[in-house]
Image (cartoon, grey):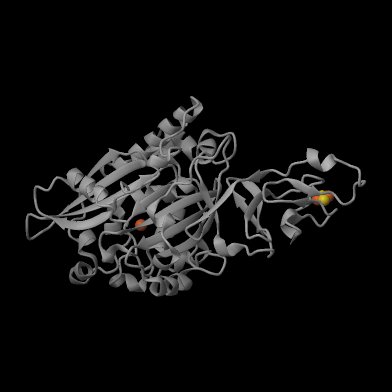
Amino acid sequence: MTALRNGTHEQREAPYQHLTQTSRGTPSGELLRRYWQPVGLSGDVTPNGAPRAIRILGENLVLYRDDRGRPGLLARKCAHRCADLSYGRVEDGGLRCIYHGWLYDVDGKCLEQPGEPKTSTFKEKVHQPSYPCHEAGGAIWAYFGPGEPPLFPNYPAVIASEDIRYTARWLANCNWLQGNEGNIDPIHTSYLHRFELTDAVEKARMGVFHIDHAPELSIEDTRFGLRVYTQRQMPDSDDFILRITNQVMPNACAINGAEANAGPGGCSMFWHVPIDDEHHWRFEFTFHVKGVPKETMTAQYASEKDAADRPQRNPDNRYLQDRDSMEHSYLGMGKCFPAHDLFVTESQGAIHEQADEHLASSDVAIARARRLLAEAIRTMEAGGDPRGVVRDPVENVFDDIVVITKQLPAGTDKRAYCNKLASERMYG
Ligand code: FES
Ligand SMILES: [Fe+2]
């Protein structure tokens, strides 16, 4: 690949560009398939209600819920003569194709072939491709990989009960990797999510991002991915603000979100699930043991996206940037963090070209996360379980996914502090 640099084109390496690929058979597409992925919201399908045509990881699928309430995820083309099953009837314990009436259960088993002779056993030889499903956190999850699925991971924001959790989804018109990399980029919060230019206003709103625009970053590999420590120096004392965010393998994160004001005991986790190489869903799970501001979030999100979870802001309307407001507002795009993130990651291009970028010291977490993904691919290709896959119930507890935004005295050992929080079972 070539890139324009100092006025000339030169060859530059993009060693991790392949991580953007999502199709079956590609290294990163196969890696993504080794983990449970959210594919829809629980409310997308109702028992015996309309099936839903979805596309995940470049595969055309149909999601439905049978008369027992079980979610099923099948290939969209009927195994008989390839009619679209998303137009089918949900009845008699399965999804019935309306071309010739073949009926499939949630496991893809063909239950009926009504046009065949009564003595026929052909239905036993036909299987509709299907994926195992699991329901948690207000979402339906699926496993697209080979063999026995790993344990469903008990991530705190996903196993939290509905009364203390908020689940949402946004369509993003860009590759999943750049979407997730924004979550482990602590510097951008001081710029992209800055509302006002006036120092006093910003200080009052979120001093943590305002006080130090060039914080000290350090990273640590964990069993689930990567922990990122961001240390911002207080201007008027020796104290510092510690913020801990996390990459959760391979396409998720755990950070402080809308629950941050409630202090320790909650987190926000986002999954960036590929629709294909150029589109993805951002699934959000926000929880706190003391509850989350659901009404506020619902009202804000409703003003920023439509009923199909498509953001109102898009390139055709220049993301509704209000240039006049930029005399006092930093980016002129309102105050909804996900809307900012979706704008900026889409602006990088449908598939971010790593050869065109210049990673700086403040991009240390992004660089390490790419290496961890590449390592995970090598582990998978050698026949092992990649980092973060859990098969032992003893390991299926994630108190070590620590998020925090807290002022601490000078000299506090941040890793020891993080370990202490992990040992305190702050998620209840
Ligand atoms: S194509 Fe589906 S039953 Fe024939
Ligand atoms: Fe952001």
Q: Where is residue 151 in the image (x, y as percent from the top left)?
A: 48, 43
Of the 4 image quadrants, the one containing the C terminus is bottom left
Ligand 2 shows up in the quarter that is: bottom left
- Vertical placement of residue 226 versus 385, above or below: below
- Vertical placement of residue 175 versus 138, above or below: above
Q: Nearer the viewer, residue 152 or 226?
A: 152
- Vertical placement of residue 33 versus 258, above or below: above
Q: Where is residue 347 in the image (x, y as percent from the top left)?
A: 44, 54
Q: Give the image quarter of residue 379.
A: top left
Side (left or right) of 361 relative to 120: left
Q: Image point 23% across, 51% down: which residue?
A: 421
Side (left or right) of 166 relative to 364: right
Q: Nearer the viewer, residue 409 or 17?
A: 409
Q: Position of residue 149 (x, y in %)?
A: 54, 40
The reply to whether residue 191 is in sight is: no
Q: Image point 26% across, 41% down: which residue?
A: 219
Side (left or right) of 9 relative to 221: right
Q: Nearer the viewer, residue 388 or 205?
A: 388
Q: Image point 50% across, 63% down: which residue?
A: 314
Q: Where is residue 274 in the image (x, y as percent from the top left)?
A: 53, 48
Q: Image point 32% across, 69% down: which residue?
A: 326
The reply to whether residue 272 is in sight is: yes
- Please state the total of marks drawn on the protein image: 0
Residue farthest to the left, as pictured: 237
